[in-house]
Image (cartoon, coloured by chain):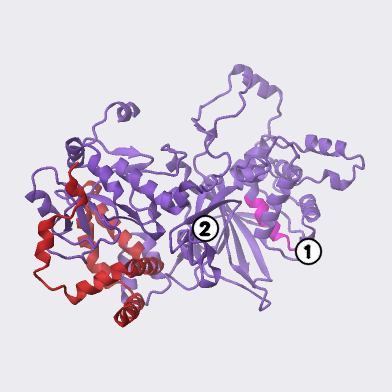
Amino acid sequence: MRASVKRPPTPDADEEHDQEPTLQEIINIKLIESGEKERLKELLRERLIECGWRDEMKALCRAFTKKKGRNNVTVDDLVHVITPKGRASVPDSVKAELLQRIRSFLASAAAH
Amino acid sequence: MSKTDHFHHHHPQQQQQQRNGLVLPQPCPHLPEFRSRHGTKPLRALQECLRVRPLGRAAIRRDPNEVPRCGLCGEAARPRLYACVACAAVSCHVHAAAHAESMPPGHEIAVDVDRAELFCCPCRDQVYDRDFDAAVVLAQIVASTLGGSIRSPPPENLRKRRRVDYQPWTPDLRERVLVGGNSSPLQLTDGDSSSDLPWGLRGLNNLGNTCFMNSVLQALLHTPPLRNYFLSDRHNRYFCQKSVASNDSNSNKNSRLCLACDMDAMFSAVFTVGRTPYSPAKFLYSWWQHAANLASYEQQDAHEFFISMLDGIHEKVEKDKRKPQSQGNGDCCIAHRVFSGILRSDVMCTACGFTSTTYDPCVDISLDLEPNQGASGRTASSKSHHSCNGEADSLSSSQNCGISTLMGCLDRFTRPERLGSDQKFFCQQCQVRQESLKQMSIRKLPLVSCFHIKRFEHSPIRKMSRKVDRYLQFPFSLDMAPYLSSSILRSRFGNRSFSFDGDEPDASNKLSSEFELFAVITHTGKLDAGHYVTYLRLSNQWYKCDDAWITQVNENIVRAAQGYMMFYVQKMLYYRASKKPVAS
């Protein structure tokens, strides 16, 4: 078995040092390292199930699969089909709640 | 395609694989090619990178704190990142195919780092590998049960009885003579015009606010397994009384009390030809003996009566020491054999993912109606109206239109529920009280499923009771598969290609989760001044049973009725292999 499975490929790492990490990247890394990203994802999952969003997306996928035929549909196809409608139909209350959580996380992260 | 083809000709590319009732899509050639080129080593190496997060989500990370980012564009915040199984290079979904193309052959298979699902880069689609999925699920189970040292006790006796195929049988000449000589034929007609009504359809006289009892009795008289049991003389009231009375020298009336005997008497009377309504006075009296606190001429709750009656039949069964008293597998009495199922309850710690599992028998499922019209939390929008008109999928459109459905109630019954911060559960792994998620599912389906809709709310604090009149839509055919523990576990552990609950791996699973509606008990009126009516479905005709009056009705009347208790029977009954050999 090739040892490279356990080592990050070195050439890619070099390219990264040429650029400064953006603010977005820093926030993302902080979210991941503190475990907050995982908690936010779970919260989002709960809310989207409760309000029926997930069932709607499931129905869209089923309808699309029925039309194209089960063997002619890929994961990428489904993602492309439901992404616009999915993003548009997230309830405002869910967006507000998540934003509030992220804001308070940033506030506490900035303090340290 | 005959049955033998599945077993003897294994061409994965040419036929759809069926495993455990799941139809897997035709696999692309890249995964088998990958396996033959690399063997199983890379996939096993992947297993060492499996990290199971709380609530069972499996991820792939080389170091626990690794932040994966795409090798080509440097992005770490993409929704899907894939690690090549051959060389561990990470790409986002946009660049995954490019990686496979730019490398020598052998880099086609990657794994979604956040979902631990295999992906074929040239096909841009998910692929399934049984061994990999088995390893992921094993890791998830280990993470949720303290390394497997604490295994939830499986419900008793469920694993031991295998299913036996139905063998068709018709009596031979000798048996025909035997049957003919020992029975007297029932008259088909009794002269009056109502002889076109089916067998066993008789009104029940109201003995003073007893419609709660009449409605339940009508449903039970036409519950197929129960009806068959009593009509085939499996509980003979003459023999039963004798055996009970002989043990009691006093021989007073109480010693002969047996609700099953009274049921037997009722079945005999009701299934005899004749259209005059039957008065279940003896049964009422016997039931009063059993449930003394409910003995009055006041209106009672039909559901409470149903539970009490099943309990009465169970209690008065002959106390046979060889028979198990447990209700879970229904071996104790006919009431539980017909109605008893097993519910599974999982409580998951949100901090560490440790899951505590318990099994409880149940004779019915009580469901809450939604607190408000339609899916909660959604803001009303013009989108709802469009969906009502256009959407073919009834589940989605009914949610948008705000109609409560039975399946919606079952969805919510099996949804993970976050227990409040005042109900923190003691986690054995964390050794402290933690916030937890509770999820119900059905471990074993009963022969007959009774759904009770909680329309009567009693608030002891405010000393107020009220009735919820909201309409509930219920189907005539119901597939319970999505609410089974195996389905709930599968969805909790992700998109895996096999069932891991262990037992009953045969394809007949699909059939055994399909149910047909045969009785509906409805309640009209107010909480304290209301009336129960039962609708029965016999030979696909619906009949309204309103105490002593039976009338044939159109199915739309039933659909529009306010369902309080709905009875569904398994479409396909099966036989369990007998423990004792039968002398032929």
Return the residue nearer the eye: B416 or B307. B416
> Chain B: what color?
purple
| SS under mark 1 | loop
Identify the magenta region: B208-219
Residue drawn at (68%, 77%) of the image: B463
Front residue of B497/A9: it is: A9
Mark 2 belongs to chain = B
Q: Chain of mark 1?
A: B
User: Which of B261 and B244 lies nearest the eye of the viewer?
Assistant: B244
Relative image position of residue B252 (x, y in whole percent): 90, 45
Q: Amino acid at mark 1?
A: Tyr
Q: Position of residue B220 (x, y in %)?
A: 64, 49
Whether B209 is among the magenta residues is: yes
Q: Quadrant of the N terminus of chain B?
A: top left
The residue under label 2 is B428
> Is B104 placed above or below B583 here?
below
Camera-nearest residue between B145 and B472:
B145
Q: Which residue is mark 1?
A: B297
Color of chain A here?
red
Give the SS element for disc 2. Answer: loop
Q: Residues within 10 Å of mark 2 (few under 14, many from 20)?
A: some
